Image (cartoon, helix red, strand yellow):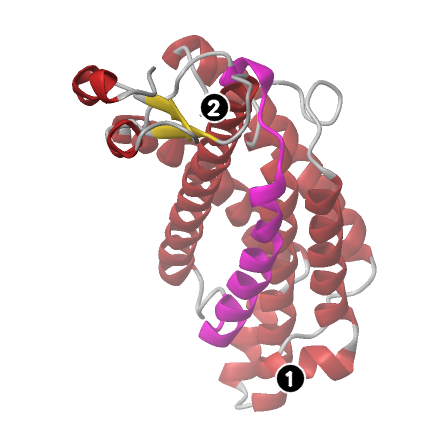
Amino acid sequence: MGDGINDAPVLRQSDVAISVNNATEIAKDASDIILLEKSLLVLEKGIIQGRTIFGNILKYIKITTASNFGDALSVLIGTVWLPFSPMAPAQILLQNLIYDFSQFGVALDRVDATFLTSPQRWQSKDLLPFTTINGTISTFFDLITFAIAGYYFGYINSYNSAIAQNDSLLAAQSLARFHACWFIIGLLSQTFVFQILRTEQLPVIQSRSTWPVYVIGALATIMAFSIVYISQIGSLVQLQSPGLIYIRISIAIIFSYCLTAQLTKVGYKKVFKKWL
């Protein structure tokens, strides 16, 4: 730290050079940081803010990558398993757009205090286990959704029967209802499990998001149900309501998913000694 001409050589050799606004031009040119206030507290605030931003970037990259991996794996398995595509391309695009909208709040989210106590580094090797484990859990509950929609609601049999009888209307209805089942679960799971994955602590109780995250997540949830259960909207993207009973089923699936994700997080931290 210096402000004079004689300090310039030392400032250039230092890891982080600090000067003040009224220092000589040579000293300021050699500095990495120029203080505009007569206080070093601004450095502390800057470090905390920088680590917070970095933490939220990590959240977005890891959680979104895990989500995309899980969706891709679900589509791959569903294409082999089902007599039709698990979801139409336009529906997947709409789902991703709503999910991306819900992620705007990540930039305003809080970061755990333990994350801020020491410098953090980006380590690409951490991405693979996080993505693989959490993405596979997502796929597991997607497959449960496929089984419920296909066999409990009977949309697979009704689709096959409609194809055999050349009943295009019944086939389209079966597809629209099956797709609606996964559309809802896909959006709700991404929205709610974010609260689990964003922190190494117990969500809501030990670590809470900022209010914009909750508001945007609530809007995404409302949009998911509105698109499916308001026929005028759902018909635009070929989605049809599977019935009110599916709301209770979707709540049970999402609750089970979040519980599984939380338990997995506990085991993950014991094995890898870190979360994000």
Q: Residue at x 56, y 44 (%)?
A: 107
- Nearest the viewer among 117 and 25 is 25
Predominant secondary structure, magenta span = helix
Q: Which residues are magenta?
A: 87-116
> Does the magenta segment cover residue 63?
no
Left or right placement of residue 88 versus residue 177 in this view? left
Q: Residue at x 53, y 48 (%)?
A: 142
Q: Is residue 81 above or below residue 270?
A: below
| Label 1 element class | helix
Kindly identify which residue carries mark 1: 236
Judged by depth in the image, the label closer to the viewer, 1 or 2, is: 2
From the image, tell me which residue sits under label 2. 47
Answer with left or right where residue 28 lies relative to residue 90.
left
| Residue pictured at 62% horizontal, 42% vertical | 108
Q: Amino acid at mark 2?
A: Ile
Q: Residue at x 61, y 18 (%)?
A: 201
